[in-house]
């Protein structure tokens, strides 16, 4: 297949997954707030740092209020990582691929973007935000389901899945990082001063699992009480849950082995898997977890650069259709 087509469909997968997981990221933070007693409060600023947009946010907004952070992450088209920007880029890449994609897929990505843009104001109101974000998640899942059921499962579809898997792995680490940044360090405060969140730890890890649609699978797999060590082990190493890091890395390895000139990239994947297997989850405190998720994200960035340099005309430069 043409290198340009491979790059566009890879980025179509990444942008669709980025929009879906951006919605999940915002929802998990909102759920953490809802699960805590009302006397506990913590801000939305950690989401900016976790998504890597602190510099741009500071240029555009005066303070990290809930309304500003939500607008920046969801509907601000000046932010190339916002949900709306991601959907716009997915739509543009799909437009470039109209001779390759099923017509139904083009219609769905177009409708998903237009509806998200039309209803973007709903994301600012707490009472309507959940429904807006869930509509984005369902729309993205419907699109990937249509592509899975209507595309030939050959090289173009492999590049689509490669983009989906890499973006999903990266965003799963970021969702985990939200949990560690906000709660494990005791940053939440109550009206009476710093609070002890230990009694609510199980509730919070359940919230993270549910944000990834993984609570039921976790209970079927672990068959025990919810604990931070077991949740981290499940989300980082399980090879059967589609949103775990271990599953995504295994899927990328399988896809790449069907492509030529992939040996260096699969070696990098093997190193990441080996590092996962050596983690002592029972002793992983907040600082160590934050460092480790940072290392994983750097590793995923290296994988992307290698994939770009090997298979795409533009190499690791700006992707087609980027905002």
Image (spheres, rainbow, N blue to C red):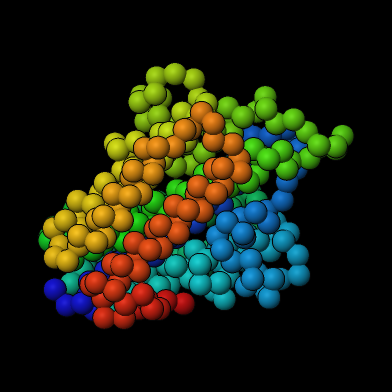
Q: How many marks?
A: 0
Q: Nearer the viewer, residue 308 or 321?
A: 308
Q: Quadrant of the rendered structure where residue 241 is?
A: top left
The single residue placed furthest to the top in the displayed view is: 224
In the image, residue 151 sits, relative to residue 94, either above or below, namely above
Using the rendered image of the protein, determine whether residue 217 is visible from the camera's viewpoint: yes
Image location of residue 262, percent across then percent down: 20, 62
Q: Which of 94 and 205 is in front in this view?
A: 205
The x and y percentages for residue 153 are 13, 57
Residue at 38%, 63% in the rendered image: 302
In the rendered image of this protein, does residue 164 appear above or below residue 307? above
Return the x and y of residue 185 as percentages of the image width and height: 68, 40
In the current view of this chain or complex, which residue is farthest to the right? 192
Q: Which residue is drawn at 78% across and 40% down?
A: 189
Look at the picture and state if 7 lies above or below 166.
below
**Near-viewer residue (108 or 163):** 163
Give me the residue at 56% from left, 47% from top: 290
Q: Which residue is drawn at 18% across and 72% down?
A: 100
């Amino acid at each position: 297949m043409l290198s340009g087509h491979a790059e566009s469909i890879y980025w179509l997968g990444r942008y669709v997954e980025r929009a879906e997981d951006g919605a999940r990221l915002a929802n998990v933070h909102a759920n953490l707030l809802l699960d805590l007693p009302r006397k506990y409060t913590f801000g939305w600023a950690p989401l900016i740092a976790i998504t890597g947009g602190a510099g741009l946010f500071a240029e555009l907004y005066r303070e990290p209020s809930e309304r500003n952070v939500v607008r920046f992450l969801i509907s601000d088209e000046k932010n190339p990582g916002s949900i709306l920007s991601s959907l716009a880029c997915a739509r543009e890449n799909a437009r470039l691929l109209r001779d390759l994609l099923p017509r139904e897929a083009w219609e769905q990505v177009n409708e998903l973007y237009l509806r998200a843009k039309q209803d973007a104001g709903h994301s600012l109101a707490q009472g309507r935000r959940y429904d807006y974000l869930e509509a984005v998640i369902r729309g993205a899942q419907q699109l990937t389901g249509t592509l899975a059921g209507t595309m030939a499962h050959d090289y173009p579809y492999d590049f689509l899945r490669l983009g989906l898997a890499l973006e999903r792995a990266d965003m799963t680490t970021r969702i985990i990082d939200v949990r560690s940044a906000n709660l494990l360090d005791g940053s939440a405060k109550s009206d009476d001063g710093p609070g002890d969140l230990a009694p609510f730890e199980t509730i919070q890890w359940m919230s993270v699992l549910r944000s990834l649609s993984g609570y039921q699978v976790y209970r079927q797999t672990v068959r025990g009480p919810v604990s931070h060590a077991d949740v981290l082990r499940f989300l980082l190493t399980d090879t059967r849950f589609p949103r775990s890091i271990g599953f995504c890395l295994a899927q990328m390895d399988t896809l790449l082995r069907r492509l030529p000139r992939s040996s260096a990239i699969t070696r990098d994947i093997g190193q990441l898997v080996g590092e996962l297997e050596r983690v002592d989850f029972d002793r992983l405190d907040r600082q160590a977890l934050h460092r480790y998720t940072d290392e994983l994200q750097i590793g995923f960035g290296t994988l992307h650069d290698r994939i770009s340099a090997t298979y795409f005309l533009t190499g690791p430069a700006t992707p087609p259709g980027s905002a």
